Image (cartoon, rainbow, N blue to C red):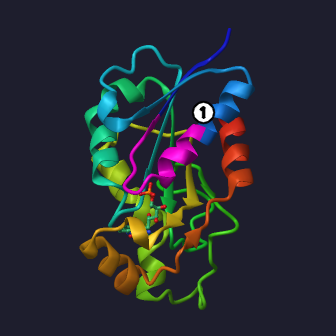
């Protein structure tokens, strides 16, 4: 029987919504029955075999996504769950997993630390464990089958002045579309059992 999948996403500038749509299309093409919805439109998870929750790093994983996982942790604890995070900075580390959860790093985005024995502050900030740890702590009942970290998109024309300043000065991001569609699709296909 076809698997019922929900792809639920948060986004600030729209690019993570497109990642969610691509994941949904890939799963549909593989035979799953898929619904794609923004976080605010999802209240009931009963109908789904697999729930995929994605959102950007916005000073930590977007707060609405973390809150969603925490709020629905009981329902999610009985299901296959996968998370994805879009980001600009990603330190190549933690590939064995974070707190026992398997992780996948976008090979095009993950950057090896300059000195693996002594990570800089920005390298530590962008560790998969630093991004994912707070989510797992807030929702301890949820045990994702996989958590993926993908390059996102930086479009300064879509940012309000505060966000613009943060991304420019703290993240020091170059504008561009860093989404690795092949890695995104491969990860999606791997989630179907
Ligand atoms: C206010 C703000 C804060 C961000 N913080 C981070 C961050 O802490 N780490 C990071 O790697 N990327 C950060 N980013 C980059 C976004 O995660 C990235 O651009 C993402 O693809 C945006 O997704 P969206 O288009 O769905 O909003 C930030 C972007 C914004 C606007």
Where is residue 18 drawn, in percent x and y? 54, 46
Q: Is residue 9 magenta?
A: yes
Where is residue 127 drawn, in percent x and y? 49, 70
Provide the residue designation for mark 1. 24
Image quadrant in which you'd find residue 116: bottom right
Q: Is residue 193 visible?
A: no
Where is residue 49 drawn, in percent x and y? 53, 20
Q: Is residue 121 visible?
A: yes
Residue at the farthest top position: 1
Image quadrant in which you'd find residue 2: top right
Which quadrant would the C terminus be assigned to in this image?
top right
Residue depicted at 54% across the width and 71% down the height? 90
* 123 relative to 151 in the view: left or right: left
Q: How many marks do you count on the picture?
A: 1
Residue depicted at 34% across the width and 46% down the height? 65
Which quadrant would the N terminus be assigned to in this image?
top right
Q: Is residue 94 magenta?
A: no
Q: Quadrant of ligand 1?
A: bottom left
Where is residue 7 drawn, in percent x and y? 50, 33
Image height of 150 relative to 193, above or below: below
- Beta carbon of the mark 1 residue lies under 8 A of ligand 1: no
Relative depth, front residue between 12 and 119 = 12
Relative depth, front residue between 95 and 15 = 15
Q: Which residues are magenta?
A: 8-21
Q: Residues within 10 Å of mark 1 (few under 14, many from 20)?
A: many
Relative depth, front residue between 133 and 131 = 131
Residue depicted at 50% across the width and 86% down the height? 119
Label 1 sits on a secondary structure element that is helix
Image height of 190 relative to 158, above or below: above
Residue depicted at 40% across the width and 50% down the height? 11
């Amino acid at each position: 029987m076809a698997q019922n999948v929900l792809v639920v996403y948060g986004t600030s500038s729209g690019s993570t919504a497109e990642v969610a749509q691509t994941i949904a299309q890939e799963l549909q093409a593989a035979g799953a029955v898929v619904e794609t919805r923004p976080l605010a439109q999802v209240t009931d998870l009963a109908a789904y075999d697999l729930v995929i929750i994605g959102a950007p790093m916005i000073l930590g994983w977007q707060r609405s996504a973390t809150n969603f996982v925490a709020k629905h942790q009981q329902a999610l604890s009985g299901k296959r769950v996968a998370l994805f995070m879009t980001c600009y900075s990603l330190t190549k580390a933690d590939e064995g997993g974070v707190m026992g959860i398997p992780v996948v790093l976008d090979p095009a985005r993950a950057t090896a630390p300059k000195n693996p024995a002594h990570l800089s502050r920005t390298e530590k900030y962008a560790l998969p464990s630093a991004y994912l740890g707070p989510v797992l702590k807030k929702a301890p009942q949820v045990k994702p089958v996989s958590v993926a970290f993908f390059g996102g998109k930086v479009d300064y024309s879509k940012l309000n002045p505060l966000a613009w300043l943060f991304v420019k000065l703290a993240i020091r991001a170059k504008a561009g579309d860093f989404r690795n569609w092949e890695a995104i699709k491969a990860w999606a296909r791997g989630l179907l059992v």
